[in-house]
Image (cartoon, rainbow, N blue to C red):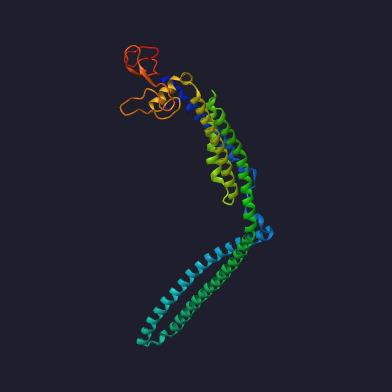
Amino acid sequence: MFKFLRAPERLYAAAMWLLSFVFAGFLIGLGGKLVADLPRLEDTLSIEQFTDPTVLRRTRDEIRALLKTQTATAEALARAQLEAQAAANAYQSAHKAYGNWIATRTATTDPRQDPEVLQRTRDLDGLQAHARQAEAGVERLDREALDARQALAARQRTEQDLLNAARGAYEHERQWQELRVFGIRLALTLPLLAIAGWLVARKRKSEYWPLMRGFVLFAAFAFFVELVPYLPSYGGYVRYGVGIALTALAGHYVVRGMRGYLARRRQVEQQSEAQRRQALTHEAAIKQMAAGLCPACERPILGAGEVAADFCVHCGLKLFAPCGACQTRRNVFFRYCPKCGEAGATS
């Protein structure tokens, strides 16, 4: 876009754009800090705030106690199961050994071994009783674990019922809180957009436009990044209302701009060829003609077959003429002839 500017002018234009972006960056950083602190204006909501605190606290205390009981019971049950298994294994091993010994006793029929038979039988009965006692301990702990699970499930259902009963009020208040925060965002963003629109409409020719352009970039960022993603899902009216207002504002300036442009074009067309030429700047005229447009009426430069267009067929502005020194056809807006370098007016 800077093709027709001199090198210092191109550098100056690039520096002005850099200044705009840097200024916008600082404004965006400041605005981001401000927006990040907006939620602090409201207290953090939780669903527990909308329940009976006494009942909820008692229920949760009971749940914590039952969880501890359940953990302790589970550990005790695991130990009891290991002990029961060890007792059962000891009984099975002793019973097998006793069977083998009885078989030997029967084969030898030695009466001196009768007292030992009785002792071995008593020992086996003791092992069996111990195994049964261990199994009873496992069964008791199983019942306790079941009771703890059922009690815990009941308390958890009670807690869930309390939270479910409070969910409606919580969601309602949360939506209002989001809407209030969004309203604050909107109250901060809309004035920025209004100021940015006014700057674009009225101050584009100001010598401080690079800074103003940075503010416009900041306002656009504030709307599209800081505001639009936070539009409440239930805030359809707000969403469409903001869209309608922005569209109407943009349409107003577009219509005004187009009317002003058409009025200026009609005014230009009523001027003489000399007046129109005098109103044109050197570089703007060359740029328009390089794009194939008449600098005065901005319509396409048209010729007639092989005949080159020396005048605009729409408004009559002289575009090309022979050089006064070498008669080369040259752009009338060139200050010097591109062939002989002669300065001054064309013939």
On screen, residue 153 above or below 263? below
How many marks do you count on the picture?
A: 0
Residue at 54%, 44% (x, y): give it: 228
Is residue 339 left or right of 74 when viewed as pictured?
left
Q: Where's the N terminus, which quadrant?
A: top left
Residue 259: percent from left, percent from top: 54, 33
Q: Position of residue 304 (x, y in %)?
A: 34, 28
Quarter placement of the C terminus: top left
- Residue drawn at (42%, 77%), measured in percent from left and top? 92
Can residue 161 be seen from the camera position used here? yes
Which residue appears farthest toward the left when viewing the image? 306
Question: x%, y% of residue 194?
Answer: 59, 35
Residue toward you, 190 or 20: 190
Residue 10 appearing in the image:
no
Comparing 242 with 11, the one in front is: 242
> On screen, 346 above or below 86?
above
Tell me residue 309's x, y (percent): 36, 25
Towards the viewer: 317 or 243: 317
Nearer to us in this view, 86 or 120: 86
